[in-house]
Amino acid sequence: MAASEEVKVPRIKLGSQGFEVSAQGLGCMGMSAVYGPPKPEPDMIKLIHHAICRGITHLDTSDIYGPHTNEILIGKALKEGIRVKVELATKFAVSFQDGKFDVRGDPAYVRASCEASLKRLDVDCIDLYYQHRIDTRVPIEVTIGELKKLVEEGKIKYIGMSEASASTIRRAHAVHPITAVQLEWSLWTRDVEEEIIPTCRELGIGIVAYSPLGRGFFSLGPKLIENLAEGDYRKNMPRFQVENLEHNKKLYERVNAIASRKSCTPSQQALAWVHTKAMMFVP
């Protein structure tokens, strides 16, 4: 296909504070961690640059991915003037110490995490800064209050939350407008539709749907489960266990049948399903 014929990804407003992003995002976690061993850095930088050239400019990372190595990778990919072309999102709150995960939302940790991410990414400002998980030991008003200060100081532009309840989102939004909520939403993860999605619609908060391909399942189906690499986090997830394979295989076959009728792949069908749900929703 000639360059002039390539279809560019359209842009939409994410949330109601004026933040504009590409309608399709690029989750970068699997480049450095979680889904098997880290991928070759030069290949991942080429992938990021290719996505940006096609209009996919909303890049998503976190300080826990690696940990830290994914932010460093993104920072390298954004050199030589590329930073101005993207909407950069990263996250804080989850740490891994002494073999255990911890979640923190106290003001000192929020500020230190932001400063560290800015340094690793080698940027002056983060476009969208998420609280990755909610620290139930700290009132959400206190955490968002510190994030509000970071906005006022110009270190972040917009505030996001990930995996928060509807009531927590409301309390946070009362302190400072929340631009986006990130949550798992796909053809086989629908529980967020009961409370969280309606709450975000009501408050004018954008939705960023992570794992819209079912963590890769709607790309390869059962073959994915059979060929997971050692160290792949998905090996520990119930949906990827052998005893659930037959049930999930039937789901994949149903999606594949629909995709065949529409002359597309199962992954394209799964993405299209999320894309058509509503405005201000970005997979």
Image: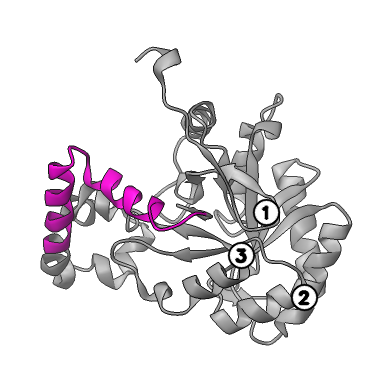
Determine the residue positioned at 26% across, 55% down.
Answer: 217
Tell us which disc is closer to us: 1 or 3.
3
Quadrant holding the N terminus: top left
Q: Seen in the image, is 11 located left or right of residue 39? A: right
- Dominant secondary structure (helix, strand or loop) of the stretch shown in magenta: helix
Which residue in the protein does label 3 denote? 204
Q: Secondary structure at mark 2?
A: helix
Residue occupying the point 61% across, 65% down: 204
Task: Give the class, few, some or many, for how many residues have Cα within 10 Å of label 2's Cα (few <14, many ≥20).
Answer: some
Q: Amino acid at mark 2?
A: Val
Q: Residues within 10 Å of mark 3 (few under 14, many from 20)?
A: some
Mark nearer the viewer, 1 or 2: 2
Circle 1 — which element? strand
Classify 55 as above or below 67: above
Mark 2 highlights which residue?
Answer: 175
Image location (x, y in percent) of residue 251: 16, 62
Residue 105 visible in this rendered orientation of the protein: no
Query: What is the number of callouts on the image?
Result: 3
Q: CA distance from mark 1 to mark 2?
A: 17 Å
Q: Which residue is the site of mark 1?
A: 128
Q: Which residues are magenta?
A: 250-279
